Image (tube, helix red, strand yellow):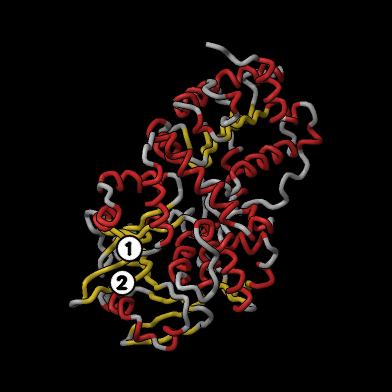
Amino acid sequence: MLEIAEKDILQSLERDNPWWADQAGATGALFTHTRAYFATFKDLALNWQVRRALILMGPRRVGKTVMLEQLLRHALKDGFPPKHILFASIDTPLYSAMPLERLISLFEKRTGHAPSDRRIIIFDEIQYLKNWEIHLKVLTDRFPNTRFIASGSAAAALRLKSQESGAGRFTDFFLPPLTFAEFLDFQGLETELIRPNHQGPNRRFTTTDIGALNRVFIDYLNFGGYPEAVFNSQIRQNPQRYLGRDIVDKVLLRDLPSLYGIQDIQELNRLFTTIAYHSGQEISLEGLAKSSGVAKNTISRYLEYLEAAFLIVRVRRVDDVGRRFQRMRQFKAYLTNPSMRAALFAPLTEDDEAMGNMAETAIFSQWFHSKELGNIHYARWKSGRQDREVDLVRVDPASLRPAWAYEIKWSDRFAESPAELKGLIEFAKKNPGHPVPVGASTRSVTAETIVDGVVIRHFPCALHCYQIGRNVIEEPA
């Protein structure tokens, strides 16, 4: 078998690791903004007391590679020896099918350091190496003074294999799309539009201008999940071209087929497009199979792939007292980032018919990095001949009872006519021995109403989206 010349591999490594020759040039500003999750990630990555590899996972284009480069520049500024740092992007053609051990051997040969030295080794896009998790586990055991950090976008293999083969050796860190709080901060609008009015574990916020905040919220729905779109006007003007092709198409047409050998790519694409268009609506395997003509087992596998690749997330249904159903016959499927809808179809306006579902998608997406994600559900049940529903319900994992419930609305109508919130009111009344705080979002109104003894808080949707994102960011690691 023909092999790539060692000198060519070394040249590639030297291009990717300029600090080996010029530390000063390598510590300059790469990207002035950092994700709100950077501090937590940095503390995990540079914790020399824990002998584990750190796996950075997340969708395409949310800033994983930038965050890795910012991490090593932080280490360099803090005086870490530049020749003890290796950065290698595994999707580089020269490294195709190359064992990680060989890259490390060339790293040691080029820089002349000892394998027992304290080192930082970063493998970007590691999923392109077959059986990467076995290689990384062996290296983590062999080099206790080396901090191994790996990342990947096509996270289906990462999530599954890091859990199966890396038990006790890997720590997963999920980097979500931009939260609304980060989006405001990146645009320099957070301090201008947001004011805290309560301190504590569940801080409340107010806005100085709800009209302006709503306009920024629409921008967030359309392109706000991706850092580069915030700063690049060309991407904002044509999200279908720059985001749709680069993010959705590459995952559907390249990443998932290469990982799982999917033959009918168009079938997978049609399923994802249907879910994206109806993000936030209840669906069922039976309904999808009937409408698409695809077998339920095939659809079930496709849903698992789409979810593992961070394109969608499925939310379980509970009944009117918060009990889960044993089988997930019906569920809601959300885009992990509302901006994907604009990338696939067209940007939203504030009066668009899809605003309600996409506002709900945006609210739910703020929970993706939270430990609470597994406790968030929606409720649906029969009330006589009618179906009742509540959009979001948190079920306390200890008591298995609802902790709170609320409806996501992009309208002020329900603050003026709260009796129309029949599902929410009935849900609260069905849990009388364990009062459940309930609420409903609005477009611009803040109020409190009482219907049949049930107190309902009304709050602006955009402000609530900000609050969840901000509080999740500040959760303890």
Q: Sort mark 2 into few (<14), some (14-19) or many (20+) by Cα contacts within 10 Å.
A: many
> x and y percent of residue 35 in the render?
62, 52
Q: Earlier in the sequence, mark 1 or mark 2?
A: 1
Residue 383: image quadrant is bottom left
Q: Are marks 1 and 2 in contact (CB under 8 Å)?
A: yes
The answer to whether residue 164 is left or right of residue 463 is: left
Q: Please tell me which residue is depicted at 51% across the width and 47% down the height of the picture.
A: 59
| Mark 1 neighbour class, 10 Å CA radius: few under 14, some 14 to 19, many 20 or more | some
Residue occupying image coordinates x 35% and y 80%: 421
Which amino acid type is marked by label 1?
Glu
Q: Is residue 74 left or right of residue 139?
A: right
Type of the residue with mark 2: Glu
Q: Which mark is residue 389?
A: 2
Residue 197: tell me if it is visible: yes
Q: Position of residue 255 (x, y in %)?
A: 47, 39
- Name the one closer to the observer, 32 or 112: 32
For image coordinates 63% across by 59% down, the residue present is: 236
Is 466 or 230 nearer to us in this picture? Answer: 230
Mark 1 or 2, which is nearer the eye? Answer: 1
The residue singled out by tag 1 in the image is 282
Q: Is residue 316 above or below residue 453?
A: above
Front residue (pair 33, 45): 33
Q: Work out whether residue 174 can be spotted.
A: no
Q: Which residue is located at x 51 percent, y 64 percent?
A: 468
Quote the CA–CA distance across marks 1 and 2: 10 Å
Q: Is residue 434 above or below residue 346?
A: below
The image shows residue 274 at horizontal and vertical percentages of: 39, 57
User: For the residue labelled by badge 2, is the local secondary structure a helix, a strand or a loop?
Assistant: strand
Q: Position of residue 417 (x, y in %)?
A: 40, 88
